Amino acid sequence: ADLLSKLASTKRPGQHQTIIQETLHSPSLDDKVVNVSDNEDLGWMAGISGYLKEGILPEDKNEARKIRMRSAKFVIIRDELFKRGVSSPLLKCLTASQAAYVIKEIHQGICGMHSRTRSMATRILRAGYYWPSLKSVCQSHIQKCKECQQFGNAHQQPPETLHHMMSAWPFSQWGMDIIGPFPPAKGQLKFLIVAIDYFTKWIEACPLAKITTENVRKFTWKNITNCQAEAANKVILRELKKRLGSAKGQWPDELPSILWAYHCTPQSTTQETPYRLTYGADAMILVEVGETSHRRQVFNGEQNGQELAADLDLVDELRDEAQIHEEACKLRASRRYNTRVKPRSFRVGDLVWRLLGEARKDTSDGKLAPTWGGPFRVTEDLENGAYRLEELSGKPIPRTWNATHLKFYFS
Ligand SMILES: [Zn+2]
């Protein structure tokens, strides 16, 4: 769009050349240039206006026919061109410069509103204005509007095909993430740090008062990747919300029981409970005590010990089976995911907006905080959808950033 706008503005000096060309009577160019540039003041309206006012038609038969056809929808009132509209009876026709003023006023002016293309185009029509490229001009204006970019919604479509990770062995790879802030609880606990084992889906979670390197280090992990932890977050958050009702400050108290419930629930990916994948047998859950289950009824301490030992011997097989389930499940998931992919890749030097996560938003802005921060410059493409960024001043931004959290900056 940037290039196009430049093309349009470089056209103007070209229009003076048409005068020269006309005097030279170069027949092939003459027609085309007259149709494109017309009169500088009237722009696209010149042909129609000329025909309606003075009956002038281009020499080319097809062009003349086109102008006659189009003119049927237009009318001259007090020397000004109007289009007979559908949404309102008469729409005033605007030149490019008039249109630019109206667009700006409708989008950012006193009575303006940063609305989307469709509603903006409707407002312009309703105000009684018309030009042929109305919708596309609105679209490119919105695309370049800084506020619209900064406060725009986060995108839903993934930018790349899914790279799924298979963990070969329990507790060899952990995903980790931090959620919060929550309403402060006893001991100023506000954040929750969550780690999930990629294989068993075992979750470790710990409430924290502050996110410091020391605090995080205490919470040991081997490999940081956050996709799975994000999934684990969702489970925990959903449960917390449902259980707390209005007692929001009690969330750390609820945590152990949520984790316990989670560990005893078979996971869709592995078809097994994290507890069983870790310990080789399922834990006795409270309901089995309340309503005596078979295994509780026939409980025999000694036999139980032997069985547990056998379970532990068999756990490898169980884990193998779970892994096969999981691989199949991930394959299905990536197939589903890949159909939604909208490719979005950036090159070194591109300017981008970066999604501001909840933690990075300026808390004093509350709900009014922008969704996007930037612009930043892409300095390195690490493949797999990860990028390194720097500020416009050249100061590098720590960490790498996934394309999911980036979008193009238009200016
Ligand atoms: Zn805007």
Image: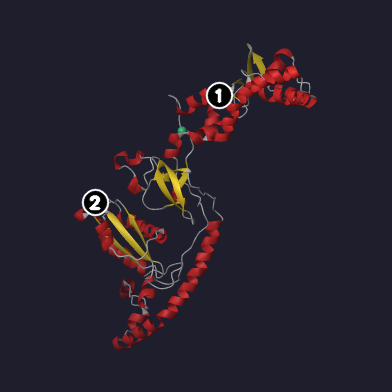
Q: Between disc 2 and disc 1, whose residue precedes?
A: 1
Instruction: Give the side of residue 184 with respect to residue 276, left or right.
Output: left
For marks 2 and 1, give the CA distance: 53 Å
Question: Does residue 260 appear left or right of residue 144 in this picture?
Answer: left
Q: Residue at x 54, y 31 (%)?
A: 138
Q: Nearer the viewer, residue 24 or 296?
A: 24
Report the front residue among 305 and 38. Answer: 38
At mark 1, the secondary structure is: helix
| Residue in the foreground of this view, choosing between 267 and 338 | 338
Q: Residue at x 60, y 28 (%)?
A: 8
Give the numbered dot on residue 157: none
Disc 1 residue type (three-letter)? Ala
Picture coordinates of residue 92, whole percent (x, y)? 59, 20
Q: Position of residue 268 (x, y in %)?
A: 46, 67
Amino acid type, label 2: Pro
Residue underneath mark 2 = 184
Residue 309 at x, y = what percent?
34, 85
Secondary structure of the residue carrying tag 2 is loop
Image coordinates of residue 1 in percent, x first then y, are 56, 36
Q: Which residue is mark 1?
A: 99
To which quarter of the image does residue 76 belong?
A: top right
Horizontally, is 341 left or right of 305 in the view?
right
Vertically, is 268 above or below 90? Answer: below
Label 1 crowd (10 A; few <14 / some 14-19 / many >=20): many
Residue at x-position 28% and y-position 63%: 219
Q: Is residue 132 visible?
A: yes
Q: Are marks 2 and 1 in contact (CB under 8 Å)?
A: no
Query: How many residues crowd mark 2 within 10 Å: few (<14), some (14–19), many (20+)?
Result: some
List the single residue furthest toward the top. Answer: 78
